[in-house]
């Protein structure tokens, strides 16, 4: 059963095993959580999908993210640095995926829309449960920072000695978010000529399912009930890239995982993730990452893999 984007489930998106997590519930039984994630090395790469649901991740950064990019539904929405001490909000309805280029230490508050509606019930508006912060906006918030700093030492405490305090703080965070940032969410606008959201999700899922062998564009178009030309134009309108380019990015994610193993040859990695050969992998890698695969591996070896 899908538990929500927190704890072990969120850790898998960042390849972190058993991240530290604190949990709570509202009176109506809605789950709340805050997960601490740490990556001690630079050049981590691209996260796996975090799951799509009617919830937010409110992220408090303790370290500056100089090299960072965020995608919503396969389309880049932010590539600006995130200074240390800032907050940003991920809308999980938009299938967020991030590129992380610097060491990371953050708290990720899991906030379902249902919890915002319940704990921010004093807001008698039609947009209750929505947060209005756009995905490219990072900001300083002393209340969120104070809650995060208060929770940090509790992660290391054994048992549930501080559970009442955790519940109080997470409930208070939800009420504060609803009061301070509640409103109509500024979600990406669907451009004229773009795919419908259901079509875009279907195409992406079909390509994920066949990331190794690939899938014919005609098959994608047939599943969406449109022509091949309309599929290609609509996908690029929606995401900014062609279906082929999007598929190559997914293969690159898999290659990055395998390249962390120094014993795996680039030729074998290229074959195992669906590239035609090592040269093809190198071209795509260099274009996306700005360095060659060999240079990236050398940098990774000098920093050592993260211990989490």
Image: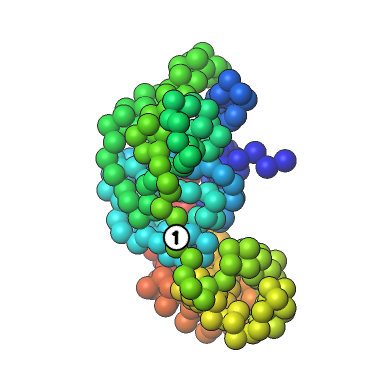
Name the residue located 45 percent from the left edge and 62 percent from the top edge.
189
Q: Judging from the image, what secondary structure is the residue with disc 1 in?
A: loop
Of residues 283 and 162, the one nearer the viewer is 162
Residue 86, located in which quarter of the rendered image? top left
Specify whether 191 is left or right of 219. left
Q: Position of residue 248 (x, y in %)?
A: 55, 75
Q: Is residue 156 left or right of residue 31?
A: left
Q: Residue 229 appears in which quarter of the rendering?
A: bottom right
Residue sitting at x 45%, y 19%: 168
Task: Tell me residue 42's x, y (percent).
Answer: 38, 55
Vertical placement of residue 302 versus 85, above or below: below
Q: Residues within 10 Å of mark 1 (few under 14, many from 20)?
A: some
Instruction: Write down the residue under mark 1.
Output: 188
- Badge count: 1
Query: Who is closer to the viewer here, 307 or 237?
Result: 237
Q: Horizontal and vertical percent for residue 279?
A: 52, 84
- Figure coloring: rainbow
Q: Is residue 64 left or right of residue 239?
A: left
Determine the residue positioned at 44% across, 60% down: 188
Note whether residue 43 is visible: no
- Tell me which corner region of the image, top left, top right, bottom left or bottom right, holds residue 267: bottom right
- Is residue 74 left or right of 177 when viewed as pictured? right
Residue 130 or 123: which is nearer the viewer? 123
Q: Is residue 202 visible?
A: yes
Residue at 56% in and 61% down:
257
Quadrant of the snapshot with the N terminus: top right
């Amino acid at each position: 059963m899908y538990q929500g984007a927190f704890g072990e489930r969120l850790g898998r998106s960042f390849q972190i095993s058993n991240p530290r997590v604190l949990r709570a519930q509202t009176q109506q039984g809605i789950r709340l959580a805050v997960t601490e994630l740490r990556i001690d090395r630079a050049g981590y790469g691209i996260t796996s999908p975090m799951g799509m649901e009617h919830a937010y991740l409110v992220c408090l950064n303790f370290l500056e993210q100089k090299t960072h990019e965020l995608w919503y539904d396969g389309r880049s929405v932010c590539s600006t640095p995130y200074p240390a001490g800032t907050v940003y909000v991920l809308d999980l309805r938009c299938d967020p995926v991030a590129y992380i280029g610097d060491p990371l230490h953050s708290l990720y508050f899991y906030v379902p829309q249902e919890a915002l509606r319940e704990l921010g019930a004093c807001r008698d508006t039609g947009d209750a449960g929505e947060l209005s912060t756009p995905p490219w906006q990072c900001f300083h918030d002393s209340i969120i920072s104070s809650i995060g700093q208060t929770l940090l030492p509790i992660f290391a405490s054994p048992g549930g000695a501080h559970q009442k305090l955790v519940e109080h703080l997470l409930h208070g965070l939800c009420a504060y978010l609803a009061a301070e940032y509640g409103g109509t969410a500024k979600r990406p606008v669907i451009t004229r000529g773009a795919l419908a959201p259901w079509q875009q999700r279907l195409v992406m899922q079909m390509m994920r399912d066949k990331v190794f062998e690939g899938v014919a564009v005609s098959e994608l178009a047939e599943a969406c009930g449109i022509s091949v030309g309309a599929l290609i134009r609509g996908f690029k309108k929606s995401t900014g890239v062609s279906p082929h380019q999007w598929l190559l990015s997914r293969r690159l994610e898999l290659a990055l995982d395998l390249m962390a193993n120094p014993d795996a040859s680039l030729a074998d990695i290229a074959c195992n993730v669906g590239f035609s050969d090592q040269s093809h992998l190198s071209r795509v890698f260099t274009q996306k990452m700005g360095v060659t695969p060999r240079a990236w591996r050398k940098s990774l070896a000098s920093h050592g893999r993260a211990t989490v």
